[in-house]
Image (cartoon, coloured by chain):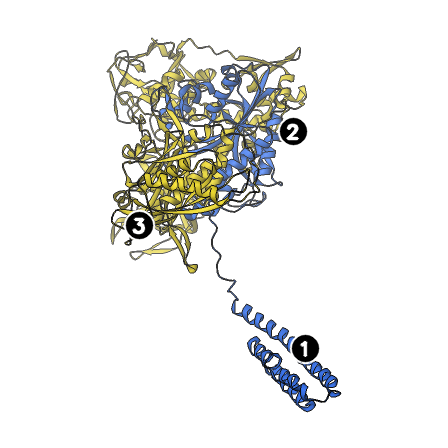
Chain colours: A blue, B yellow
Amino acid sequence: MEARLQELKNEALGKIQAAQTVKELTDVRVAYLGKKGPITDVLKGMGKLPAEERPKMGALANEVRAEVTESLDAHMVILEEQAINEKLQSETIDISLPGRPAKAGNPHPLTRVVEEIEDLFLSMGYEIAEGPEVEKDYYNFEALNLPKGHPARDMQDSFYITEDILLRTHTSPVQARTMEAKGGEPIKIICPGKVYRRDNDDATHSHQFTQIEGLVVGEDIRMSDLKGTLSVFAKKMFGEEREIRLRPSFFPFTEPSVEMDISCFKCGGSGCNVCKKTGWIEILGAGMVHPNVLEMAGYDSKRLTGFAFGMGPERIAMLKYGIEDIRHFYTNDVRFLTQFQRTEL
Amino acid sequence: MLVSTKWLKEYVNTQELPPAELGEKITRAGIEVDAVIDRSEGLANLVVGYVTECVKHPEADKLSICQVDVGGGEIDQIICGAPNIAKGQSVIVARPGAKLPGGMKIKKAKLRGEVSNGMICSLQELGIESKLVPKSYAEGIYVLPEQAEPGTDVLSYLDLDDTVLELGLTPNRADAMSMLGVAYEVGAILEEDVRLPEIDYPEAAERAESLLSLEVDAPEANPLYVAKVVRNIQVKESPLWLQQRLMAAGVRPHNNVVDVTNYVLMEYGQPLHAFDYDSLGSGNITVRQAKEGEKITTLDDTERTLSAHQLVITNGTDPVALAGVMGGANSEVSDETTTVVIESAYFAADSVRRTSKDHNLRSDASSRFEKGVDPNRVIPAAERAAQLLAQLAGGEVLAGSLVSDHLDKQERIVKVSPDFINSRLGMKIRLEDMLDILSRLKFKTEAANNQLIIEVPTRRQDIQIEEDVVEEIARLYGYDEIPATLPRTDATSGGLSPYQAKRRIARHFLEGAGLLQATTYSLTSEAAATQFALEPTETTRLLMPMSEERSILRQSLLPHLLESLSYNTARRTDSAALYETGAVFLKGQDELLDEQEHLAIVMTGLWIDHSWQGEKKAVDFFVAKGIVEGLADKLGLELSFERGEMDGLHPGRTAFILLDGKRIGVIGALHPSEQKKRDLKETIVVELNLETLLARETEALVYTQVSRYPTISRDVALVLSKIVEAQTIEGVIRKAGGKLLKDVRVFDLYEGERMEEGKKSLAFSLKYFDPEKTLTDEEVNAVHEKIIHALTESGAELR
């Protein structure tokens, strides 16, 4: 009987080692340790043994059972792990396949430029003023020191609807309206919007385009304040290392009037195709609000002064992103629009 | 304005500055130099030649064989194709090795068997624009007006060793529309004095009045008129230097008389006119308003009909010139002219501008009168012209002038305090620096009692108020010297208005939902102006449109957005989803239009394109509807949808969008015929009155406690007539469900062949909930039964 137990043990241990899968091993467990298994059979035959041998045989049988169980459990762990590994292996995916695209649109490049400028001035305490695109001649010209008969308000250059109503040629009428509405109070505004001029559309001209203007009116506003404000703007928009320079110019609604150049952001000032070899790029027009403009709006030009500036987001976007044709802004080619998706921060 | 730097040196010392550097200084001081043009660019090895012999080429009719003395005792044979070549001419020769503009190099060549050692040049070949070449040489070579030493370098002889500055003048700087004006500007920048031309000429004993009488009937439009008479002149070609200066200034030389008037125009900025005295026929000049319907043929051979507000110069009866704009053909100076009348006058800017505009005729003269000429240069310019005619045309200047003078030539006085200047600039410029700048500008200034009393020369019509002086001081002191400060206004809060903030929220939502922002034109065609308009009104048309395509203001954003879609699909971008916010223009009560800000969406092609995982979905009505609903949620608004129809949209797939029962938008599929016309596949459009949407004040957001009691779900599947709308059934369910019914949602729709004809199956998922307690089955069943009862009552069949 002892020999039979030893034999069974060796047989079981051999089968355990030979088992390749969890199922095979489970079969071994059932076969050797189950209620109908040979070890149980051996133990059932113990009754035939002499009483003194029973404890010894019982102990031996339990020993064999324990040894087989232990081996089986140990091997089970290995096989289970192997089974999991195989499953994982079969579940492996090609991580290089493309993801499900998240839906994402983006703003028009002009909105992008305008919002960037708006945000900068909002952070400096400005408000955003808006006004009608179909405007009265008075606000578009007369209130801005462009009396009737002034060459700059030629019928040829503007889209008139009647003698006195036209599509605004700049966003300045919003300034005139704001001043009139504020009744002598200080002002800090930014006026973005669409404007219209009688130009034939080509790579650099558009009968419809956008402008963004700024106006500050208050006590003791000086030209140095204009320069400081424009300098903050230039650095924020075009990079901290930008220098600005002012050149005298002429606008009927400002005196003195200036044009602002920034040091070229492409070459840094050494001269390239963007700055036409000059090192400087013309960005905007500005000046101190003409006393006639202040007086027309009911401001005492002796007490309050102001500055104004204006620029074209199209030009800024074209310079900034290297866009070669202004018509791209209005044809809405998806291949154009989607390029303005990512941040530049 | 084109400024020859070589000519400029006659009036002011330019300190041998390289032209580009001089240009930069001028730009920085306020007059933008648009271009620096080297007149000798691309030219080399050009010499004066003398044609000693000229015979026809035996083999070619149009060619001549010339023997040309090119200096140093050398005679070269040159073949010339110009019709005007002749023996005895001094000409421009490009010898072998010479360079001409455009990179052309001259080599020794053989032309029909004859050797040619170079080329005899026209002015065009030297890079001079055709429109500036004197008419007599337009078709051939240029013949030098005077004999010149063969071998002389052409560049210096023709003054082509010159650089021209092209000034981009702003309208206020009319003073710089003359060489003298530019000289004053350069003088102020470089701290140099200006040398005026010395005027000195012999006068005849006889007085001008003996030949001519003058009458000015319109002293307001013509406050100053000066006429001088020069006789015994010989009309011929001008000397080379004069021709070259005019060409450098962009003026075509004609003959010595015309050239002198143009030269003085360029020099003084004072337009002059020369009449042929004999053609006047009357010995009289009368300036008067035109008679209505009167006619004149101007120098450009155009007959013009005049109006009463236009000013004319007459010979006492008939017009001989359109005052300040252009002379008349009937009194033009010709080769036969021997006596001329020189007119120098001051014509009122308004009058000239109006006349020039009426006739759509702009001239060098009118462009100067329109901006106002210097009252104190009218008389000197007449004198200068007389002097030059005496010098260059052998003329005899009659003594005195005929003058009608009502013009105020007084210098304007502008008073400004140094403190005012510094406070406007935010600077601390010293008084002596201010005085220095004013003296450089040649503004006579007195400083007294903290006040600068400035006598502004009449050439500077633009200096009128204190601020103008501020600019003069600042621009010459240097804008670089202005410090950079920030406004010291009382702190303003600034920020976006609620409307502006919500518009940004709306935009960001739409972009997050996958739409690209587009921008289209406001002007459109008559046909497109009201298509898809929510509330079409009478259209608004421009007085002078540039094209029919851009003649009317739009009343809907959709037509142009759809054009953008077609543009994209034509370029193989088959899927696109765009949105735009912008104004539409409706006729309103006011004289201004009723401008409303709208939002429009267009989408076509695939909405989801993830085909390798089997996901692909074309745009449809519900994709767009979901975006509109999402936007409404974002803005805290409740919108409803009502089946409707609109031209151009699919009659079964269109709905109006309502806010509080008021129609504020439309959503729909493009009509198949419209799709075909625009070459689009299934396309969905939305247009909303954004203004109404954003103007609504949104309620404050208050949190609802998250309940610890569970929600219980029940489904109900119904068989309905196809025409019954889901929202109707939802209404029945909600009404019957009462308080405990928390949510109703469609989860299935079946319209397939297993359904009876005209029927559909619609399944709803209902959620029951009581915030106070856990609902029991009995409680839920009771409500659910009630709902089912209401549904069957309404004609729905339980499935």
Q: Chain of mark 1?
A: A
> What kind of residue is marked 2?
Pro
Residue B742, above or below B474: below
Left of B617 or right of it: where is A259? right
Provide residue B544's location: percent of width, then percent of height: 31, 27
The residue beneath circle 2 is B483
> What kind of residue is marked 3?
Glu
* Label 3 and label 1 in one chain: no
Other residues around mark 1 within 10 Å, as few (<14) / some (14–19) / many (≥20): few
Left of A54 or right of it: where is B86? left
The residue beneath circle 1 is A70
> What kind of residue is marked 1?
Glu
Residue B284, above or below A270: above
Other residues around mark 2 within 10 Å, as few (<14) / some (14–19) / many (≥20): some
Q: Please identify the quadrant where the C terminus of chain A is shown.
A: top right
The residue beneath circle 3 is B751
Report the front residue among A159 and B532: B532
Provide residue A22's location: percent of width, then percent of height: 57, 75
Q: Can residue B761 be seen in the rendering of this structure?
A: yes
